[in-house]
Image (tube, rainbow, N blue to C red):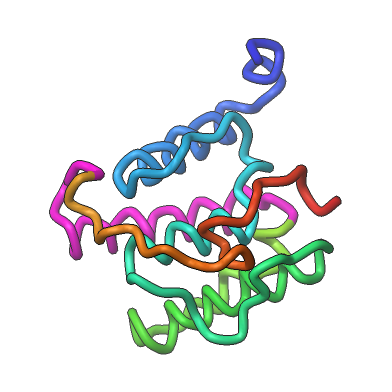
Amino acid sequence: REANKLSMSSSERDLVRALNRILDRVGLERVARLEDFDSLLLLRIFRRLFIGIPSGVLTEPKSREQHERNFNACVDHLSRTVLMMDLSHIDGAQLAHSDLEATGNLLEILDELHEIFHGEGAPAAGTPPRRVRGAGSPETAPRSSRYG
């Protein structure tokens, strides 16, 4: 684990810290690497922030293309439904490839939305109650290695 930290750039470490801050706020398990931020984790964050997930997402994506599709659906949902602003600078393919700029932009938006909905630094206890879902739900699906 320590070797992994040394191999990450300072920008990557900053993004992992930002992601873990969001995960802590919404009551989800922390990650060690930026590559752990896949579309299933984003869907789990969405469920906690918005008590639901965008329509059209795959609850068990297996390939990079399926994760790209989910990332795009989430960004599109944020753009059209939540923020009502253009987010074309954040692309699902970039997110699926752990692009630092796209990931940083998305994490900044999620952090700000958490502050709006739950107050700055709100504890995980202030998040919506967890819903019980079926086995195919992103909330209950097992975390697997990236795209494989």
Q: Position of residue 39 (x, y in %)?
A: 62, 61
Query: Which residue is at a point 65% across and 59% down the rendered structure image?
Result: 95
Left or right: where does residue 31 sit relative to residue 17?
right
Query: Which residue is at a point 70% across and 12% down the rendered structure image?
Result: 3
Q: Residue furthest left?
A: 119
Placement of 131 over or under 80, stated as above or below: above
Q: Total label count? A: 0
Given residues 123 and 7, the one toward you in this image is 123
Query: Which residue is at a point 42% across and 63% down the rendered structure image?
Result: 132
Left or right: where does residue 94 sit relative to residue 54?
right
Looking at the rendering, which quadrant does residue 32 occupy? top right
Query: Which residue is at a point 20% across and 45% down the rendered structure image?
Result: 125
Given residues 68 and 56, the one toward you in this image is 56
Left or right: where does residue 81 sit relative to residue 2?
left
Q: Position of residue 137 (x, y in %)?
A: 57, 66
Q: Position of residue 12 (x, y in %)?
A: 59, 35
Looking at the rendering, which quadrant does residue 61 occupy? bottom right
Placement of 38 over or under 85, stated as above or below: above
Q: Position of residue 79 (x, y in %)?
A: 44, 82
Looking at the rendering, which quadrant does residue 62 occupy? bottom right
Let me know if residue 113 is in the magenta part: yes
Q: Main secondary structure of the magenta part?
A: helix
Image quadrant where one finds the N terminus: top right
Let me know if residue 144 is in the magenta part: no
Which residue range is magenta in the image?
97-124
